[in-house]
Amino acid sequence: MLDVILLVYVFVAMISFNKPDESKNVCTEVNIVIADQNANGFLTANEVKKMMKDSRMYPLNFKMTDIQPRLIEDLLCKSPFVKTAECYKTKDNKVFVSITQRLPVIRIKSERGDDYYLDENGGIMPHSRYTSDLIIVTGSVSKAYARRYVAPMARAVMADDFWRNQIEQVNVTPDLGIELVPRVGNHILYIGALPVAPRQ
C-alpha cells in the first residue's frame, strides 16, 4: 500500500514539475488582419496597432494571462472606421486581431462646410483622408437628408458599373432637386427630387 501511495506521489510530482507555468508566458507576436484592405477603406494594420498602443492595450510582451481579448475588441469597435473586431489568443503565445472595416460609398461636402463620408448603411464616417474613387455630393445637403435620401441613391449608383463610371458629382439644389455631373462633357443631368427611402 505504501509503495502504491509513493508511486502516485512521484507521478503527480513529475507532472507538476514538467507542466509549464502559464503565468510567466508573454505574447511574442501580434497578427493584425484587415478585411478589404485594398478597397476604399481607411484602416491599416499600423493604425490598428496605434489604437491599441494609445490605450496601452497592445499585447506584445504582455503576460498572456493579462491579455483580455474582449476588452481589445470593445476598444477597436469604438473606432468609426471599424465594423467588427475579433481578438483571440493561441497556445503558442500569439495574439490574432481580425478587423472588418466600414467602407465609404460616397463623400459629402455640403455648402454648410460639412465634410464626411457615408457607408453603405448611411452611417457617417469622419473625413480622415481623401479617396478619389468616390462620387462627391455637394450643395444643400444636411446629415439627415444624406442618411435618408443620399445613402440609398449612392448604393444604387455604386452597384452599377455604368453609373459609377459616368457620374463624378451629385449636387443638391436648395429645393432638394438632384443634379448629376458626368465625368465627360459639360452638361448636367437634372433628375428632380429623390423618392422617400423606407426606414431601415
Image (cartoon, rainbow, N blue to C red):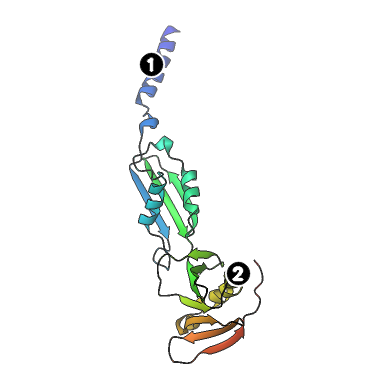
Q: In the image, residue 179 lies at what x, y percent?
A: 54, 85
The C terminus - image quarter:
bottom right
Q: Nearer the viewer, mark 2 or mark 1?
A: 2
Q: Nearer the viewer, residue 135 or 11?
A: 135
x and y, in percent, of residue 42 in the image: 42, 63
The answer to whether residue 91 is left or right of residue 200 is left
In the rendered view of the protein, which quadrant contains the N terminus?
top left
Give coordinates of residue 160: x percent, y percent. Answer: 51, 79
Of the image marks 2 and 1, the number of the one nearer the N terminus? 1
66 on left or right of 175: left
26 left or right of 106 in image: left
Quick check: 38 left or right of 173?
A: left
Checking the image for residue 61, the label placed there is none
Distance between mark 2 and mark 1 Cα atoms:
73 Å
* As drawn, 192 above or below 12: below
State the image quarter where residue 5 is shown: top left
Question: In this view of the protein, which residue sits in the foreground, 66 or 5?
Answer: 66
Q: Residue at x 50, y 55 (%)?
A: 84
Residue 146: horizontal and vertical position, in percent?
57, 72
- Give the class, few, some or many, for how many residues have Cα within 10 Å of label 2's Cα (few <14, many ≥20): few
Crowd band around label 1 with a 10 angstrom C-alpha radius: few (<14), some (14–19), many (20+): few
| Three-letter code for the amino acid on which mark 1 is drawn | Val
Q: Quadrant of residue 99?
A: bottom left
Rendered residue at 50%/83% (across/down)? 163
Residue type, mark 2 in image: Ala
Report the residue marked by disc 2.
144
- Secondary structure beneath dot 2 equals helix
12 versus 134 height, above or below: above
According to the picture, the residue beneath numbered tag 1 turns out to be: 10
- List the single residue furthest toward the top: 2
Give the secondary structure at mark 1: helix
